[in-house]
Amino acid sequence: MHFALCSYFGTIYPMITFQSLGGLTFRCTGAEMPLVVFPEKAAGNDAKSIVLLALPEEDAQPANILSWPGEYNEGGVSIYGIGHKEGQQVSYVAEIDGVRCAFLSSPLQDWTDRQIETVGEIDVLTLPTENAKVAQKLIDEFDPRVIILLPTSDKEAYAAITKLIGVKGEAVSEYKLKSSLPAEGREVVVLEK
């Protein structure tokens, strides 16, 4: 595990890495166990990772595969699953080494005031590039310091969202949060598909 100095409240945080695995799937490392977020299916995933699925799995799954709303503590990571569409879709909030990350599943959903209040403050927000109106509302509500965009095949929505939040630079295959979170404004990153 790599450590980087972080001036956020004068604390040292481990480096957190977000790596594209194709499509809307990405790996988040920095905790004891890495997270594989939104793979198309759980089968074949590494047992040494915590797997977060967007769609609930009816069949029994190993403890490292999460697919339902609720509170979890796996591999040293506190995870909260938020259900949408009466539990038919799940987004997650994970606290990784003191950094609160929200992983919003696709299709992007409106969140109730209660859901937003339950989640609380977010440092890093990952969201699919679809539905610019809903994306703007969620960005305004959560006010994250870092936004990681996950491109979808909807080029029109992608263009609208990147214009809306001012994306600068090219898409990257990997993003490392290795120093302090931005004290003012926010950093915007696009992960490659």
Image (cartoon, helix red, strand yellow):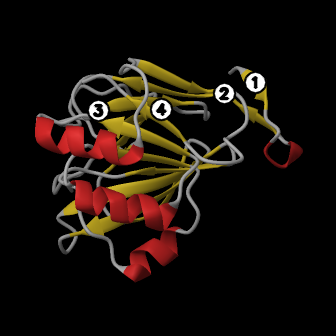
10 Å crowding of disc 3: few (<14), some (14-19), many (20+):
some
Residue at left offset 28%, top offset 40%? 38
Cα distance, mark 2 to mark 3? 20 Å
Discs 1, 3 touching: Cβ within 8 Å: no
Residue at left offset 73%, top offset 36%? 180
Judged from the image, the secondary structure of the residue bearing numbered disc 3 is loop
Residue 55 location (% of width, % of height): 19, 53
Residue 184 location (% of width, % of height): 68, 48
The residue at which mark 3 appears reads as: 25
80 to the left or right of 159: right
Of 193 and 32, the residue lying toward us: 193
| Precedes in sequence: disc 2 or disc 4 | 2
Discs 2, 3 touching: Cβ within 8 Å: no
Q: Which mark is residue 15?
A: 2
Q: Which mark is residue 28?
A: 4
Residue at left offset 40%, top offset 75%? 115
Cα distance, mark 1 to mark 4? 15 Å
Discs 2, 1 touching: Cβ within 8 Å: yes
Residue 49 visible (yes or no): no
Query: Which amino acid type corresponds to the residue marked 3 in the rendered image?
Result: Thr
In this view, the residue farthest toward the right is 10
Find residue 56 and report its image quarter: bottom left
Q: Which mark is residue 3?
A: 1
Residue at left offset 59%, top offset 63%? 121
| Precedes in sequence: disc 1 or disc 4 | 1
- Look at the image and tell me in which quarter the N terminus lies: top right
Cα distance, mark 2 to mark 4? 10 Å
Query: Which amino acid type corresponds to the residue marked 1 in the rendered image?
Result: Phe
Query: Which amino acid type corresponds to the residue marked 4 in the rendered image?
Result: Cys
